[in-house]
Every structure is written in C-alpha cells, then in structure tokens.
Image (tube, helix red, strand yellow):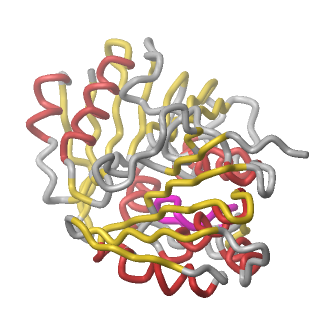
C-alpha cells in the first residue's frame, strides 16, 4: 500500500490566503529546481495547493496534473486573482467532476475540493496543454511559455537585425530558442549559453536547438552562477513579473550582461519603445547605438 505523506505546491500562493505546509514539494516550472508535476505518480499526494496560471489552457493543464497527482478524497486548494482566471476556477473544477467550495478574499477566488475517485475530462486537458510542434514557428512549444504560439515581434526584429556573431556568447531569456537559432547560424560562434527561468522553455529549446555549441540552463539569471569573458550577449528581456509590469527585470538583465561581457564585448538588446533602458545602458557601456526601430520596438547594440 502506497504511503501518501507528501504535500505539493504549485507557484507561490499568498500565505494569508492558502498557506502550503512546511516541507511541501514545489512543482512550479518557473521556480528552478522544482519537481516536475508531469512526473509525479498518480494518486501519490495527500494535499495540493495551487496558485493557478492566468492562461486558460495552461491553467486547466496544471489543474489536471494536480488532481491526477492527488490521492482520491484528498484536498486540492486552488486560487487566482478574479481577473486572471479566478472567476473560472469553480466551473473548471466542476467540469473535472469535483464538488467545489468557493470563497473570495483580497480580489482572489479560492476554491477547495476533494479529488473524486473518477475524474472527468482530464486526458483532454492534459493533451491540450502538452508540448506540440508548431508549424508556423517551426519549433516545439508548449502553452504557458512566453510567446508560445506566435513569433514575438520584438524577437523577430532583433533576429533580422543581428549581424553574424562570433566567439562565446549568451542568450539571456532564451525561450524556445528562436534567437539562438539565428545566433548559431554563424559558424564563427563557438559557444552559446542559453538561459531561461521557465523549465518548459528550456525543454522545448533542447528539442529545437540540436547543436553541440549550445548549453541550455534552467536558471534564474539573477541568482545563477555568473558567466564572464563573453564576446556577446543577445536578449529580449522580460518586463513582467506575475503579470504586472516590472521594469527592474529588464534593467537587471542589462546589468548581468555588462558583468558577463569582456571589454569590447557587445550586447544586442530588443525592447518595447516605452521602456527607459537607455539610462541603464549608457553608464555600463562605452558605446550605445540604436540599430533598428519598428512597430513599437527598438534594437540596441551596446559595446562594453
């Protein structure tokens, strides 16, 4: 008989709304080092607390995984802001065959349910949220990854603007590997470190980039081991954290790039036109040049 003693948590739910017990296993793909909920044995957890993702397909997928991992009769607590999927949670849980109790606090909807013995619609939700090959992107992708089902226009502009690079470099926030593919088209590139905070992105990038020069790392750049002596860094830095705009994210990426580059090394950066990155770039780099501007985006080359 299976010993069901572990509790799981997905994401970082506000503790005052739904606190996960100490020692819970973290399963968020956005927290490096976490467990992979897809690999958790069915009916193996005694409790699950989930901060639900905002995207419908991703949210139903995470909910289905959480219910599958729970032992029958055990409790799932799942919450989200009302305007980011919270208002749909109860209906989605009922569609899986759950009896739901629902409360509202601090603009969140908080749902609790016991896992029924028989779950409805789970396989459909798992298939819908699973990795797939996108013909339009020419890449493997998965719902929940940044720009998972379309080519991000900023990355597209940077890809068109990049010259043939050479030496050792980094793709900071590599996503599916769209920019890395352009970088590695140059035979003069000898090494490319690809970083992303999203495990799913690094897994898809590993499928999309089959090149011995590439090293793919699931890591938060802000706390990862520093690279030094790079000849180039390329990035389309994030500027949202938990759905809210956070310009400090992109600014921290720029500082990390400056620390990682050798003297004379170059940073290639694309950003939304409204983001005030020039003030961060100019003190850190000897020369900052606007190389392209189009459709609300701008591309900079900055030489250290």
Q: Magenta span has 147?
A: yes
Asked whether the viewer can see residue 197, the reply is: yes
Q: Which residues are magenta?
A: 138-148
Residue 236 in percent (x, y) is at 37, 48
Q: Nearer the viewer, residue 217 or 244?
A: 244
Residue placed at 43% from the left, 28% from the top?
232
The answer to whether residue 82 is left or right of residue 98 is left
Secondary structure, magenta segment, majority class: loop
Residue 102 in percent (x, y) is at 39, 76
From this view, report whether residue 17 is shown above or below residue 174: below
Q: Nearer the viewer, residue 14 or 152?
A: 14
Asked whether the viewer can see residue 270, the reply is: no
Residue 89 in percent (x, y) is at 46, 78
The answer to whether residue 23 is left or right of residue 236 is right
Q: Nearer the viewer, residue 253 or 80?
A: 80
- In this rendering, the count of numbered labels is 0
From this view, report whether residue 124 is shown above or below residue 232: below
From this view, report whether residue 159 is shown above or below residue 221: below
The answer to whether residue 41 is left or right of residue 149 is right
Say which quadrant the C terminus sits in: top left
Residue that sits furthest to the right in the current view: 1
Residue placed at 54% from the left, 31% from the top?
23
Residue 60 image-quadrant placement: bottom right
Q: Nearer the viewer, residue 32 or 240?
A: 32
Residue 283 in percent (x, y) is at 11, 24
Q: Magenta span has 85?
A: no
Residue placed at 20% from the left, 65% from the top?
106
């Amino acid at each position: 008989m299976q010993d069901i003693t572990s509790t799981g948590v997905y994401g970082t739910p506000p503790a005052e709304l739904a606190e996960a017990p100490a020692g819970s296993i973290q399963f968020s793909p956005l927290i490096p080092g976490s467990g992979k909920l897809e690999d958790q044995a069915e009916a193996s957890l005694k409790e699950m607390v989930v901060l639900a993702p905002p995207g419908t397909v991703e949210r139903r997928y995470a909910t289905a995984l959480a219910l599958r991992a729970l032992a029958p009769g055990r409790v799932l607590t799942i919450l989200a802001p009302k305007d980011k999927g919270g208002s749909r949670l109860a209906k989605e849980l009922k569609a899986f065959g759950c009896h739901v109790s629902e409360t509202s606090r601090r603009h969140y909807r908080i749902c609790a349910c016991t896992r029924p013995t028989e779950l409805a619609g789970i396989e459909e939700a798992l298939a819908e949220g699973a990795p797939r090959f996108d013909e339009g992107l020419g890449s493997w992708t998965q719902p929940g990854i940044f720009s998972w089902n379309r080519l991000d226009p900023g990355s597209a502009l940077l890809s068109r603007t990049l010259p043939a690079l050479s030496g050792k470099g980094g793709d900071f926030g590599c996503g599916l590997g769209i920019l890395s593919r352009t970088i590695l088209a140059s035979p003069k590139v000898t090494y490319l470190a690809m970083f992303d905070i999203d495990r799913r992105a690094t897994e898809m990038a590993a499928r999309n980039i089959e090149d011995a020069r590439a090293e793919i790392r699931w890591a938060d750049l802000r706390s990862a081991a520093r690279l030094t002596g790079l000849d180039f860094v390329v990035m389309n830095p994030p500027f949202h954290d938990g759905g809210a705009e956070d310009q400090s994210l992109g600014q921290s990426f720029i500082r990390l790039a400056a620390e990682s580059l050798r003297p004379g090394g170059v940073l290639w950066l694309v950003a939304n036109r409204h983001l005030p990155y020039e003030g961060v770039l100019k003190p850190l780099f000897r020369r900052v040049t606007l190389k392209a501007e189009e459709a609300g985006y701008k591309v900079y080359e900055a030489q250290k």
